[in-house]
Amino acid sequence: MAESGYTLPVWVAAAARAALAQLVGEPFQEEQPLLLELEGAAAAQPVPVVAAALLGEGRALAVARCDPGDGLDLTRGLVVWVEASWRTLEPELGPAPPGADSSWLELQAGEGVGVHAATRQLCLSAFARRLLEQNLRPLLPAGRALRLQVIFPVGRRLAERTSNAAFGVVDGLALIGTQALVQRSAAPDQLAAARSELERRVAAPEFAGDLVLVIGENGLDLAPQLGLPPALLLKAGNWLGPLLVAAAEQGVRRLLLFGYQGKLIKLAGGIFHTHHHLADGRAEVLTALAALEGLPQEQLQRLHAAATVEAALAELAAADPAAAERLRRRIAAAVEQRSAAYLARYDQQSMAVGAALFNRDRVLAALGPLGAELWGAFSAETAFRAET
């Protein structure tokens, strides 16, 4: 089994601790002792940093380099800079997770760090903030308050390879890990975990044959907001093909695939393991479907040359909204058709698979023919439960 490494919040916390240690006059340590469990009394774990130094009176900089362990990960080798400086202690700096006293800690997004498009605030999870608070507060002198600026020098470029923009995160990589150890959606053990949860759902007395397979953590957050029943939601990693077959084998009769259009389009091309390191072809699939839709050559060339599927469809929508809508519907229909063909190869034709795609604005962008039917049925179930 592949060895798991640490998520991005851990490396930020390590660099932050090293920078603060310089401010308080401690000698540099190549390994920072971090408490990685937010609950319980687990021992501190050594997390390496590259360097740390004072920049002048009341300012210090530390550098760490991400190591997510074995396997494929976007953050591998990512350099993390954290600048620490003293600031005036204020009663309260703004909203913080429940129970957290954050008046002593101010966080700023530097270059390459993702921010919420609407507020321009640093995008970080409650886990990431609590990890910083837990490991920095013991070093902080009485009466002092700290400002941290986090910088990912190549974060803006790496973010272009993610779907962050689909969830309102811009300018870089979000600091949204929810635990210290990396969980790999591309790893076989992730497939095993999803299968185990699937078996548990199917065995439940209330199981009625319906399931919504949600692609990714962000889709899991969005689905109930758009009216899908939380009880039907099952998060999938990148092993979509085997999980579809497992669902059919376990007795699921109606399955809705819900995911970001830039991800689910891979299924329209027959790619059922969707990790970007293992298989891509999105531009080719998009262009082929657009050709089948009858778009002219000039538009096909622009679609193929676009940086992302999202950008391609947005450009098409600006030039020809009707064509963009038809193309999105064709993508959703192709996802359904290729999913049915994939299941037929394993003699599992009894399960109906619908597709629902959303875009970067967190708006439902397209439904396949079966997807529209299932969306209506499942949404109606949510509305009925709310009324009763």
Image (cartoon, grey):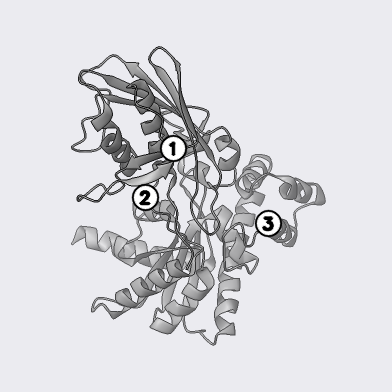
Comparing marks 1 and 3, which lies closer to the viewer? 1
Per the image, the residue denoted by label 3 is: 286
**Residue appearing at x 39%, y 53% in the figure:** 181
Regarding mark 1 in the picture, which secondary structure is present there?
loop
Near-viewer residue (167 or 76):
76
Regarding mark 3 in the picture, which secondary structure is present there?
helix
Near-viewer residue (208 or 280):
280
Contact between labelled residues 3 and 1, with CB atoms less than 8 Å apart: no
Looking at this view, name the residue that lies furthest to the bottom: 347
Q: Name the image quarter holding residue 192.
A: bottom left
**Residue appearing at x 28%, y 49% in the figure:** 37
Contact between labelled residues 2 and 1, with CB atoms less than 8 Å apart: no
The answer to which of marks 1 and 3 sits earlier in the sequence is: 1
Regarding mark 2 in the picture, which secondary structure is present there?
loop
Q: Position of residue 216 (x, y in %)?
A: 45, 56
Per the image, the residue denoted by label 2 is: 180
Near-viewer residue (10 or 23):
23
Q: Position of residue 155 (x, y in %)?
A: 55, 37
**Where is the C terminus found, in terms of image quarters?**
bottom left
